[in-house]
Amino acid sequence: MTQTDVKPTDKLDQTQAAFEQESPTAPPPEPEEPGTDEPTPPVLDLSKARSLLTELVPAGMGEVLVTDVWARPEPKKVEKAEGEAQPVDRQRAWELRQEMRDLGLLKERPLVTYDARVEQYWGQAKKAREQAREAFTDPYTDLVISFADVDLDGMNMSELRRNAREYGREADALLALGRGYMAIGKLKGARQVFQAAAKAEPQYPDVWWHLGVVDLFTRANRSAASALEEAVDQSPGDFRAEMALSLARYHLRDYSGAEACFKRLAGSEGSRAAARSMLVCSLRMQHKYDEARVELSFLRQCRPGDWSAVADQCVDCVERGEMKKEGPLRRRRRIIQILKTVAAAAGGGIWIAYAKAEDLFRQQAPYATIPLFLAVLMLARSLKGISGRELPGEFGNLEQGLPCWQTTTWMKPRRSEF
């Protein structure tokens, strides 16, 4: 899946305008004239933001990078009943939350959204990060911010192309040219340029890192892992190269390989805290529940950011993993899936009998096969649930502003809008 160039919509223009108004360098708004009813747009305060999360989302016939700034959720009003309050069943609360989300009754919107359909996107993400000092950032946002220093106004791409033909200057010129293509959203062109730079200068770890990152952004995870391994081999101990390699292995579901990388990067601050949270997820996916709990105890102490809430979410996910493998949750869900399978098979059989009795397969074959196709689809989905395999919707909690690495679009792409 590749990213396409899409013109910004009116909504994006409004978002960008709102972001510019929050900037301390922006001129103060002009006073409203008497008699005008137009309200003054609110100034966004990102200092209290909870998190910055970046994903790939469908846009036209491709995908586009989107960074969401999430605010802290409103505190819940708890009504005290007579007598002692009953303890909250967190797993039951999670199930109710998932049901509400499936029914479209759970509406959670970020404080502000930026996406790569505008050239200012990379700088917007960096500026938001600087203002949201108490928020935590996922590794993908850090990758986006690394391209914020590209100066498109002062870049002469024609001159860079000429320099790329001169001996000894090819790699540097191609690297700068590729970063320019990245900044304007031409990821396919950037990938070709970085490949040419790697061919011109194979011993250039920065080129291999850029090639691996653009592969990550275009879901070419296997080639991304190969390029980032070259970067790590040529520059051992480079944090950003090892982090990008960890992400590539995680995307490939090589959880043991991702675990080895994240263990070297895990810490208690900033990007190292994000690496620890992804280490927990890698352990949980390998059913190493005790080791995951140990890492979660360290994750609670990470700063800045609301990592303790992330740890609570991950604890629930670890418990569900154990219950799904052996426990009442596994039995109950298998019974539900068996009932769904029987219902789908019975529905398909009834329709076949009715269609044969009415001779619908001969008279209206295209329309008669549609319900049969849907019944087969439901049957296949139910059989997958009976197998005991964990489904994407069974991970995390997806609470507002909290990441769940197994449910992001990096691991579970959404269907294209086209």
Image: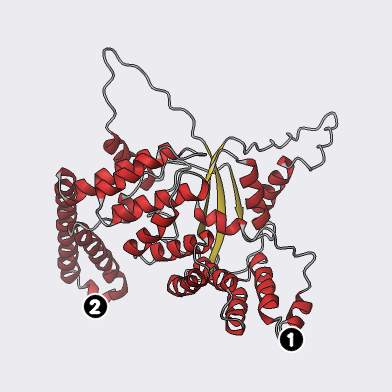
Residue 100 percent location from the top left of the image: 36, 41
Q: Residue flagged by tag 2: what amino acid is it?
A: Arg
Res 362 label = 2
Please rate how many residues cluster around mark 1, counting C-alpha atoms within 10 Å: few if below 14, some from 14 to 19, many from 20. Answer: few
Residue 172 percent location from the top left of the image: 68, 75
Res 166 label = 1
* 95 over 117 or under it: above or below: above
Provide the secondary structure element on which disc 1 rests: loop
Colour scheme shown: secondary structure
Residue found at x 62% / y 84%: 200
Q: Quadrant of residue 204?
A: bottom right
Residue 2 percent location from the top left of the image: 53, 71
Residue found at x 47% / y 69%: 219
Left or right of 300 on screen, residue 8: right
Residue found at x 60% / y 41%: 132
Residue 188 percent location from the top left of the image: 58, 75
Q: Is residue 404 visible?
A: no
Q: Quadrant of residue 145?
A: bottom right
